[in-house]
Image: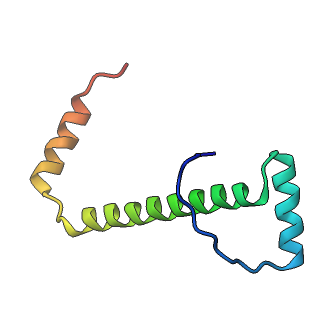
Amino acid sequence: MVTGVARKQVLVQLDDALIRRLDRSAGALELNRSELIRQAVDAYLDACEEAAWDVRTVRAYLDIPEDIAEMEEFQRLAAAWPEP
């Protein structure tokens, strides 16, 4: 846990089943609810950012037309590459 970081309290409504699951997981990890929620939200947002980066990367490659001559040269070089 990071100390000395300014925090804001945020109200989040959860149903009873989710709270039970949260408490079980927090207990197993020896964390309190708040810390587990902070870690979970951080991990989720990191995953979303990584997924968005992946989408942007794929789109960038799709937007750049293939250079046929360059691809043929790569294939020629790959065919001539010695086996390990």
Q: Quadrant of the N terminus?
A: top right
Query: Is 83 or 49 nearer to us in this picture?
Result: 49
Q: Quadrant of the C terminus?
A: top left
- 17 relative to 42 in the view: left or right: right
Could you say where residue 3 lies in the image, as x and y percent from the top left?
59, 46
Could you say where residue 68 lies in the image, as x and y percent from the top left?
14, 57
Query: Is 3 or 77 nearer to us in this picture?
Result: 3
Give me the residue at 14% from left, 43% from top. 73
- 75 relative to 31 in the view: left or right: left
Question: Where on the picture, by quarter, is residue 74?
Answer: top left
- 9 relative to 68 in the view: left or right: right
Give me the residue at 38% from left, 66% from top. 55
Seen from this angle, which residue lies furthest left? 69
- 79 relative to 49 in the view: left or right: left
Question: Where on the picture, by quarter, is residue 44?
Answer: bottom right
Task: Reply above or below: 55 against 16.
Answer: above
Could you say where residue 71 lies in the image, as x and y percent from the top left?
18, 50
Task: Reply above or below: 27 against 83.
Answer: below
Colour setting:
rainbow
Could you say where residue 81 lies in the image, as x and y percent from the top left?
25, 27
Number of on-image labels: 0
Seen from this angle, which residue lies furthest top? 84
Task: Reply above or below: 62 against 75.
Answer: below
Query: Is 40 or 2 nearer to us in this picture?
Result: 2
Give me the residue at 22% from left, 29% from top. 80
Give me the residue at 25% from left, 35% from top. 78
